[in-house]
Image: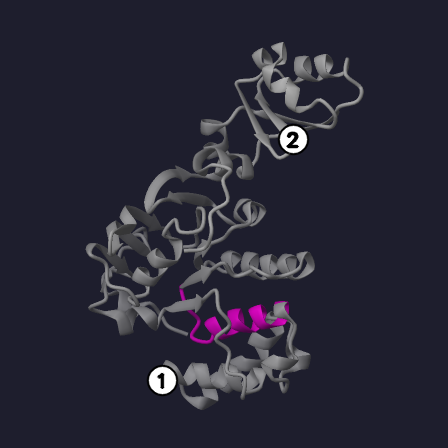
Amino acid sequence: MGDGSAGGNQRVDAPILSVKNLSKRYGDTQVVDGVSFDIAPGECLGVIGPNGAGKTTTIRMCLGLTLPDAGSVTAFGLPMPRDALAIKAQLGVVSQLDTLDPDFSCAENLLVYGRYFGMPGAAIRARIPQLLEFASLSHKASAKPVELSGGMKRRLSLARALVNDPKLLLLDEPTTGLDPQARHLMWERLQLLLQQGKSILLTTHFMDEAERLCSRLLVLDHGKKIAEGTPRALIAEHLEPDVVEVFGAGALELTHSPLRSLASRVEVSGETVFFYTSQAKLLLQALGDTPQLRTLHRPANLEDLFLKLTGRQIREDS
């Protein structure tokens, strides 16, 4: 659905979503502080950060649900919230919370949602079988949400977000609470959408999800953008190439040992010592002299990046 005519004279190479200097304060708390980013057609931009970093508030401002104190949001060449209706006609949204109607079957949820966009009933009904098939829910067309597993509900929410054939999807932690099998099936479906040329703005707490799906990442903390780039480029820019994890009796004592000289940075989490190093071979050889210690050698990853930039301290939801 939709031929992009609502975008006016938007250039083919123009960002599909452009956010400039977005800010939002609640009382004494600056929730979003001067955040800017663009999303190109066919791109998946991941937004990561601790609880309270401003991710959901940023998405709400992109949707016109929360008015910014400063800054602007432009989608498909149109300003939000002035042209909210025209923009939302080309958007698909999957929120953190389940918003499926419990009184309707899977097929009826899709039908009713399509009507919000003013789509003719016949056009929606024609799309329902392919949407249910996409969500691997063809066998559940008559089932109500209460009869579905958590993974099925999330896939139905994604299918519902596709009723209007949107160009841009805004997904707020779409796989939170799912088991590994359900997450992998959701990732497969999102990959298919990217292959079809759709754009995605994705917030997530799963670093493997961000690395798998996102062509670019935005790292938020305390409402500010603290890093932006491709996953590989961010890891190369901020981290040493290798990580050696050491645990077992006496591991914590290594933080004060000469082995520190073989690492650029040493961190402790619980009973594990993390050596961030470009001299992994020498470090592992030295650790071989203490057989009571257990080691894990691996390349640096997005989780290491996340923890370096935002800290290891757990933050409660705010």
Residue shown at the point (74%, 25%) measured from the top left = 249
Q: Is 158 one of the magenta-colored residues?
A: yes
Seen from this angle, which residue lies furthest right?
291
1 or 2: mark nearer the eye: 2
Crowding near pointer 2: few (<14 within 10 Å), some, many (20+)?
Answer: some
Give the x, y percent position of residue 3: 35, 70
Type of amino acid under label 1: Gly
Give the mark, 1 or 2, whose residue is nearer the N terminus: 1
Main secondary structure along the magenta-highlighted residues: helix
Helix, strand or loop at mark 1: loop
- Residue 318 drawn above or below residue 116: above
Q: Nearer the viewer, residue 253 or 76?
A: 253
User: Does any portion of residue 162 appear in the rendered image?
Assistant: no
| 116 with respect to 138 (left or right) | left
Reply above or below: 117 against 39. below
Is label 2 in a helix, a strand or a loop?
A: strand
- Give the residue number, with chain letter if any, for mark 1: 118
Q: Is residue 157 above or below residue 303?
A: below
Quarter of the image with the C terminus in it = bottom left
Is 160 in the magenta? yes
Question: Residue visible at 28% across and 66% down?
Answer: 64
> Does any portion of residue 276 appear in the rendered image?
yes
Residue tagged 2: 272
Position of 63 compared to 9: left or right?
A: right
Which span is picked out in magenta? Answer: 151-167
